[in-house]
């Protein structure tokens, strides 16, 4: 079972990934470009955490 700090970290990463995905849908890609690197890194980290 995950400890409290690990669970909080995963929730924060998941929240950012979901919010970034919503931003990608709502604004032009040129405006959302700064979010892409962090989105990819956190998405990969969440994928590795679930594996």
Image: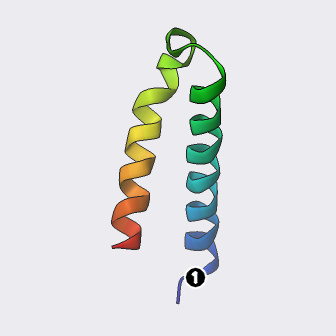
Q: Is residue 22 above or below residue 49?
A: above
The answer to whether residue 17 is above or below residue 29 is below
Q: Determine which quarter of the picture holds residue 20.
A: top right
Scheme of image coloration: rainbow
- Image quarter of residue 14: bottom right
Question: Residue 10, percent across and down?
Answer: 56, 63
With respect to residue 15, does 22 lie above or below? above
Q: Is residue 15 above or below residue 39?
A: below
For this orientation, the residue located farthest to the bottom is: 1
Q: Position of residue 41 (x, y in %)?
A: 38, 43
The residue indicated by pointer 1 is 3
Residue at the image position 57 percent from the left and 27 percent from the top: 24
Please, what secondary structure does the residue beneath circle 1 have?
A: loop
Q: Residue furthest top?
A: 30
The number of numbered discs placed on residues in the rendered structure image is 1
Q: Name the residue at 39% across, 40% down.
A: 40
Crowd class of label 1 (few under 14; some 14 to 19; many from 20; radius 10 Å): few
Is residue 35 left or right of 23 when viewed as pictured? left
- Which residue is at 45% across, 36% downward? 38
Apparent side of residue 29 relative to residue 5 in the rendered image (left or right):
left
Q: Position of residue 21 (x, y in %)?
A: 57, 38
Q: Is residue 41 left or right of residue 19?
A: left
Nearer-the-camera pick, 9 or 40? 40
Relative horizontal placement of residue 28, taking residue 38 as reference (left or right): right
Quarter occupied by the C terminus: bottom left
């Amino acid at each position: 079972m995950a400890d409290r700090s690990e669970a909080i970290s995963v929730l924060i990463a998941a929240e950012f990934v979901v919010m970034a995905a919503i931003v990608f849908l709502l604004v032009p890609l040129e405006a959302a470009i700064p979010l892409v690197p962090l989105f990819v890194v956190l998405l990969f980290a969440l994928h590795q955490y679930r594996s």
